[in-house]
Image (cartoon, rainbow, N blue to C red):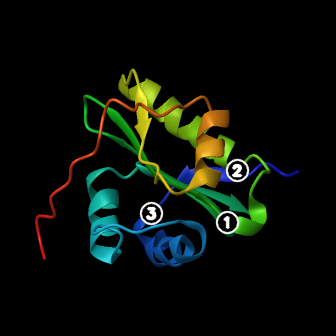
Amino acid sequence: MTEPRVRAAGPEDLDTVLAFWKTAAEGTSISDDRTGVERLVARDPEALILAELDGELVGTVIAGFDGWRCHLYRLAVHPDRRRRGIGTALLTAAEERFVRLGGRRADAMVLQRNETAHFAWTAAGYGPEERWRRWVKPLTD
C-alpha cells in the first residue's frame, strides 16, 4: 500500500476537513465548526494534521500542546480506508510533534460508545484511565 502523505492543514483545507468529519468522525462538539477550526489553525498552525492519498483527504488528527500537556482529538480515518496504517501514520506524526515540543505524555479524547475507536487506540498503545472523568461547561449558548 502507498504511504499516506502527512502534513499540517492550512486555512485552505478547513472546508474539506469539516465535510470529512461528517463522514469519518463520530460525535461533534461545540468547536467543530468553521470558526473553531479556523481559530485552532491560526493559533497553532501545526496542530491539525492531515493524511492524504492521491490528493484525497483520508484522515485527520488534532495534536494540541498547551505547553504542559499533549492532547489528541479528532483522530478520524475515512471508513473505506481503515485498517491500512493511516491512523498509525497520523499518530506517529502527532507523537513526534509532541516530543519535539517537549511533551511527556499524550492523552486522547475517545467517546465511550465508540468501541471501534477503543480497539484502534489500544492497538496504538493507549489505554483508558478510569480514575479520571472529564467535566465540561459550555461557555457559549
Residue 58 picture location, percent across and down: 67, 63
Q: Amino acid at mark 1?
A: His
Q: Is residue 123 left or right of residue 134?
A: right
Instruction: Specify the label residue 10 is tagged with.
Output: 3
Q: Is residue 138 left or right of residue 29?
A: left
Query: Which residue is label 2 attached to?
Result: 86
Nearer to us: label 1 or label 3: 1
Disc on the earlier residue, 1 or 2: 1
Instruction: Specify the label residue 78 is tagged with.
Output: 1
Residue 99 picture location, percent across and down: 45, 24
- Badges 1 and 2: C-beta atoms under 8 Å apart? yes
Depth order, front residue of 25/91:
25
- Rendered view: 140 above or below 8: below
In the rendered image, is residue 54 in sight? no
Rendered residue at 46%/49% (across/down): 110
In the rendered image, is residue 129 in sight? yes
- Dot 2 falls on a residue whose secondary structure is helix
Residue 133 picture location, percent across and down: 29, 41
Disc on the earlier residue, 1 or 3: 3
